[in-house]
Amino acid sequence: MTDDGIPADRRADLWVDGSRRPPSSGTYAPVVDPSTGTALGEVAVGNSDDARMAVESAESVRELWGETPGHRRAAILYNLCTRLRDDRETMARLIAREVGKPLADARVEADRAGWVFEFAADTIRHMTGETFPADAYSHPPGNERRLLFTLRDPVGVVVAIGPFNFPLNLLSHKIAPALAAGNPVVAKPTSAAPFTALRLAEHAHAAGLPAGVLNVVLGPGGAVGNALIEHPSTRFITFTGSTEVGKGIAERAGRHAKRVLLELGGVDPLIVLEDAPLDVVVPAAIRGAFAYAGQVCTASKRILVHESVADAFAKAFADAAKQLRVGPALEESTQVGPVIDAASLDRLDGFVADAKAKSATVLAGGARWTGGGGGFYYAPTVVDRVPPTARLAQEEPFGPVVPILRFGTDDDAIRMANGTPYGLQAAVYTNDLRRAFRLAKRLRAGGVHLNDPTNLRWDALPFGGVKESGIGREGLRYAMEEMTDVKLVSVNFG
């Protein structure tokens, strides 16, 4: 391993049964640094044979890991947390180089991943069943001589499919609860950030995780992902990514009666009421909209502003966006880094062109940023007077392009906020908390933040969406409950 966390041969291989393995195809693809457009190394292009090998490795230790006492599982996870904390800077720099996340944000992600494994270890002590008063039930006869209680059993091999935007933390949100609940894992991380995932696997092995309990397979979803979902030994699929891919995973898993936990897309609204202090709202909206170049599922992707303050807000918001420092992820001063690839630039161009064709006005940005050499940069963009029919108001741009929509009444705001197929998170800014609570109750979202931007998340608390934004809830205890089967046990002591 080199000082930058990348193996000396610059290759990201598979991780199966506790060691690196080349793909059965012998094929590799480039891993590109979005800040420069140049290759960092190569990533294995796995196939269905590799997927089956990884599942078989996990299945071979399923009973061993499931029967491992909780305190031993916790000790390994605590040890892994310590290793991640000690390796924070290398992990952060890997994240920055692989996915273009500004270094300050990448450090926060590295910290959060350590906390996730710590929280998972803590939660093992609280994963208890329930007891029931058997004599409260008249049928079947003899309940006065019975004791009833439930146990939680590991569900089996968990498939963890992670996204590019949080290649360490969101993968940890799948691996940590699965391991804590006694399930072996086959992880399929993004091929955009394979070195981050493999370093996590190496740390887990060094922390004492038995070989086979965590395996990592890299490759295209059509070959690797489908093989993992359809293998008879996998029982649970947890995925973060686009809604369309998530729907396909749910359909395929459903045909095999497998459970899913899906954290999908969103076009999260941030609502600004007329009494909200703009000196507070504007900086918060900037953070919510432009953190990690808007490539966050909970980013504030639509700003809904009351018409009486819309002009003032739009000017202040656009002026602040123009002041953001765009640059390479490894520069300490960078606030907005690159997007993940060239295809994202093309997509963002399409969103802006569509909004302009529908009479919207670009107040800031609106084009690619050319100061980054060969990297994939888009200028922080603010588009005002966007109609609800524009793509920016209905779809997820996943980049630093933010629409402002204007409303006149609270009913208008709710209708616009709820008027998409998504419902991940929402935010409301106002000094009138009674009004805020009324709006929060009417918003169709998995989380509503009052006087905070949409992109807040507490790693130990329930997180997920409604409608087409997801199925189930992450957050350590909640994910662990999803990843276990409830078993009723009755004891006749008569």
Image: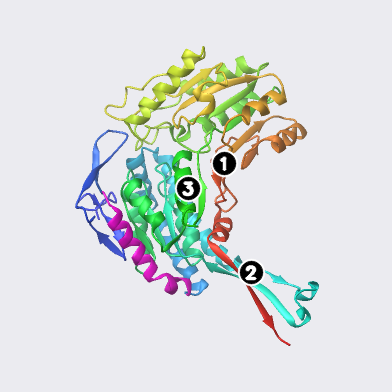
Marks 3 and 2: CB-CB under 8 Å?
A: no
Using the numbered discs, state the Cα–Cα distance from disc 3 to disc 1 in whole angstroms. 30 Å
| Amino acid under disc 3 | Glu
Using the numbered discs, state the Cα–Cα distance from disc 3 to disc 2 in whole angstroms. 31 Å
Question: Circle 3 sits in a helix, a strand or a loop, which is it?
Answer: helix
Foreground disc of the pair 1, 2 = 2
- Residue 109 placement (x, y as % from top left): 45, 46
Q: What residue does disc 2 label?
A: 129
Using the numbered discs, state the Cα–Cα distance from disc 1 to disc 2 in whole angstroms. 31 Å
Count neighbours of disc 2 (C-alpha within 10 A) and say few if under 14, some if 14 to 19, many if 20 or more. few
| Amino acid under disc 1 | Leu
The mark nearer the N terminus, 3 or 2, is 2
Query: Which portion, as a residue range, is magenta?
Result: 45-67
Which mark is drawn over residue 456? 1
Q: Quadrant of residue 229?
A: bottom left
Q: Residue furthest top?
A: 359
Foreground disc of the pair 3, 2 = 3
Which colour scheme appears in the figure?
Answer: rainbow
| Amino acid under disc 2 | Gly
Which mark is drawn over residue 251? 3
